[in-house]
Image (cartoon, rainbow, N blue to C red):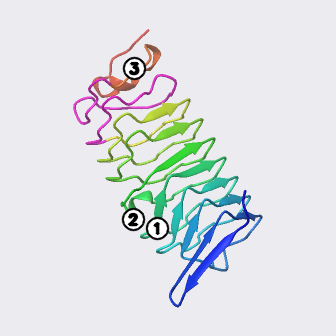
Amino acid sequence: MTPKRVEQTENYKMIENKLFEKKDYTEKKLPCDVYENCRFVNCNFYNSDLLNVTFRECQFESCDFSMASLKNTAMNDVLFLGCKLVGVQFDECNPFLFSVGFENCVLKLAVFYKTKLKKTRFKNCNLQETDFTEAELTEAVFDNCDLQRAIFHKTNLEKADFRTSFMYSIDPEANKIKKARFSGMGLVGLLDKYGIVID
């Protein structure tokens, strides 16, 4: 990573190419408005207020974002690796150029209501009770994810890939699932509402 660069004007501050490690933001706010190409490792954002902060091409590793407030937070090409994001309301993020990815993350009770997540990749994630109501998940990939009690209602799942995920319950009549991909074992998750017994 190249040396950090900080730009600052009277009301605006940006940091580029910096590593933040083992920082605790539960009591203090992030010092800048914009972070570009930064890495955050083992940082604690639990219940933090990230109002109006912008992250561009940033990576978070083993960070705790549980219950963090993301009102108007901008996330453009942001990757979460091994992070805890329990109860995070991603629907409150700034929708402009919103782009995220998740790997080995805990996203229980997270909210993606009406969020545009086209081609988003969730890999090895716990998505129990996550709310995807009215979300745009066209071509999204759910790779080995636990979707127990996750909420799909009026969700666009066209061409989404659920082949390696499990415990989901998706009503084909209440969601768009054209060309979505499911494994034979996972078909039971599309038939829950009918009370059918599959041996």
Q: Secondary structure at mark 3?
A: helix
Determine the image quadrant of residue 161: top left
- Which residue is situated farthest in the bottom direction here? 10
Q: Is residue 166 above or below residue 187?
A: below
Mark 2 to mark 1 CA distance (whole Å):
5 Å
Q: Camera-side residue: 133 or 117?
A: 117
Task: Find out whether the residues at labels 2 and 1 contact each other: C-beta distance under 8 Å.
Answer: yes
Residue, disc 2: 94
Q: Residues within 10 Å of mark 2 (few under 14, many from 20)?
A: many
Q: Is residue 191 left or right of residue 49?
A: left
Kind of residue indicated by mark 1: Thr
Q: Secondary structure at mark 1?
A: loop
Magenta segment: does it hold 8?
no
Residue, disc 3: 188
**Is the C terminus in the top left, top right, bottom left or bottom right quadrant?**
top left
Relative image position of residue 39 (x, y in whole percent): 67, 58
Q: Camera-side residue: 77 or 143?
A: 77
* Image depth: mark 1 or mark 3 in front: 1
Range covered by the magenta-colored residues: 153-179
Kind of residue indicated by mark 3: Val
